[in-house]
Image (cartoon, grey):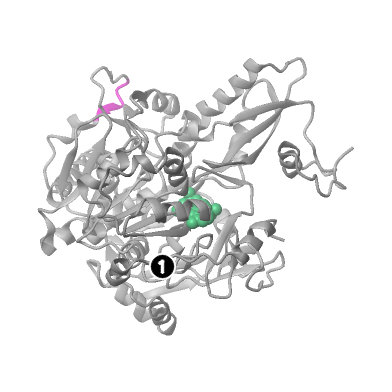
Amino acid sequence: MSGHDDVIEKLARSTVRLQPPKRVRDAAKVQDYDGWYESWEADPDAFWKDAAESLHWFEPWLRTSEIALPQHQWFVGGKTNLSYNCLERNIERGLGDKVALHYESEHDPSRAFTYREVLTEVSRIACALRSLGVGKGDRVVIYMPLGPMGIFVMQACARIGAIHSVVYAGMGAGALRQRIEDCGARVVVCSDATYRRGKTVNLKSIVDDAVAGLDGVEHVLVHKRESATVLQSNREVDLEALVSPQPDECEAEVLDAEDVAFILYTSGTTGKPKGVVHVHGGFAVGVHLLMRNYFDTGEEDVWWSTSDIGWIVGHAYICYGPMLVGCTQVIREGTPDYPDSSVVWQTVAKHGVTTMFTAPTTVRMFMRMGAESLEPHDRSSLRMFYCAGEPFNPEAWTWAQENIVEDGFVADNYWQTEIASPMLGTFACMDAKPGFVGKPMPGVRLKVVDHEGESMDAGEGGALVMEQPVPWMMRSVWNDPDRYASYWNRQLGGYVTGDIAVRDGEGYWAVLGRSDDVLNVSGHRIGTADVESALIEHDAVVEAAVIGIPDELKGEAIKGFVVLHQGRHGSADLEAELKHHVRHVLGPIAQPAGVSILDSLPKTRSGKIMRRLLKARELGLDEGDTSTLED
Ligand code: PRX
């Protein structure tokens, strides 16, 4: 049923195993994976109690969980604060003068901030937000590139109990507006610009478009990086001017473990993005636990994730995770291939990065650039090299193991915006089987099922379902409890991930791709429905269908098909205009690689567009069963 039979067969035949080098194995925080997993199975309450006790609680929790699906609560009654746990808790442990954050950029000078300095910056911003009347439960949309300011604003929101919703600063005005409206943000915090490949990207004009006519937005706070930026309406405020006179201290709000920390929008199967809701307590416990015991990162490490604050990886493992464990982290604004192909390795050498996190797409880009760009740079500090976000093809995995890490270990991990930390991963203490992500985290019980919910055997592909909730997963979909409830499917027996998976006889799991109409372009999740509705918004288009086509570098590329209104005629100019239109609405990551103009779209007799057929035709494959095709 999975439609991935060829990959499953290839996996079954593969005998490739990569062993962690001795120094990795010896240093692994979890030495015995089975024993660790079994300790959760034997006594979940004791396991979660132990995990949560590493963090600060203003008041202890009464019960570790209360589950009445689709609702689930963790550390019930406990009072805590995510930002307090990242900052004061570490300063009290003596880490105040330690560097929390090294910032690198292709444009600005390098900077470093100690834990104490981060606390001061975050506190000033938190006071500034409070001075505008922003408080617990208020939504703040953040549209900023990866940089200290973006992280500080997120932490400042968490500090005062405001709910942040970061929109990736590469999304278009339409996507930004939709998110601001859906979460009812009172405040938008943005940067006027970011810098990519030597060019200045104007973000302010996108924000201007997005908030035009939205009266609910009371303030637009602008982090000015360009002296030429002029603030216009009186709701626009210069962020730094507002922040600099504020006091250095701002007491963290005492929050309930289940209070909402953030909303992060992601693509689903309809054109309306889903606002995935995460809370303070369970998120902090899960991220802290897995940062240490899965990502193998403690105080002694230098961590670098190449993600962005606009994605879930940037929430869990840039903004919060590194500061929860008290390590030093590196962030870099810019692309990994500019100003030259060795900038990543120069950065690793400069800071002695020990644990790194990127995406398979980036590895494939390194492969394409060739091992020569790595060679002159000392990578001996790299102990662990993690990848996630899309299927990690064995060729790229093996290449990374052979070429990137000298005496380190490459590991895949699998999760989603909805589950804010890994579900599966290869641990530092276990052999890697390229093609298989690895084994489940404690708390995670998975199964593979068919359409009826029958469990499939090892070696058989099907829908991946998680049987019970974990503390670090979503609590709801903002404004849409029914959509949230639909994730928990009684017939399939749990939380439906939307992915197709297979496990082998040794307990390793492989995630093969989506079972729904969600594409994965360079590790970014894009709904076909989002792109289709953007195309239909164009006045020439009457109907649109979008498919993913395999792309060696990006995993998938987007291909659109449109039918035009009568009287409109296709041309190369119109095709280019349609691509540009999608870019404007959704941002460059969603821009189709191509748009074809057709006289009609293939449909079933009941009127459903047959995307499968468009894909088969595009790729020159067998068209399969076309008996339901409309004449
Ligand atoms: O389809 C799976 C794929 O990415 C989706 C989640 O994307 P996002 O919400 O952006 O969160 C990314 C967090 C790392 C999943 O439903 N995916 C993620 N990791 C893997 C993966 N597919 C295969 N292997 C992975 N390691």
Residue at 26% from the left image edge and 47% from the top image edge: 348
**Vertical arrangement, residue 169 with respect to residue 64, above or below:** above
Residue 31 image point, x, y percent: 33, 75
Q: Quadrant of residue 130?
A: top left
Residue at 44% from the left image edge and 29% from the top image edge: 214
- Amino acid type at circle 1 is Gln
Q: Quadrant of residue 289?
A: bottom left
Q: Is residue 415 visible?
A: yes
Residue at 62% from the left image edge and 65% from the top image edge: 13
Drawn side of residue 552 relative to residue 44, left or right: right
Which image quarter is the N terminus in? bottom right
Front position in the image: 368 or 262: 368
Q: Within the magenta stretch, is there residue 617?
A: no
**Magenta stretch in the rendered image:** 233-238
Instruction: Tally the marks.
Output: 1
**Vertical arrangement, residue 545 with respect to residue 1, above or below:** above
Secondary structure under the numbered disc 1 in the rendered image: loop
Front position in the image: 419 or 16: 16
**Vertical arrangement, residue 369 with respect to residue 88, above or below:** above
Residue 200 image point, x, y percent: 34, 23
Residue at 58% from the left image edge and 66% from the top image edge: 465
**Vertical arrangement, residue 127 with respect to residue 490, above or below:** above
Q: Within the magenta stretch, is there residue 234?
A: yes
In this view, the residue farthest toward the bottom is 42
Residue occupied by mark 1: 19
Residue 345 image point, x, y percent: 30, 44
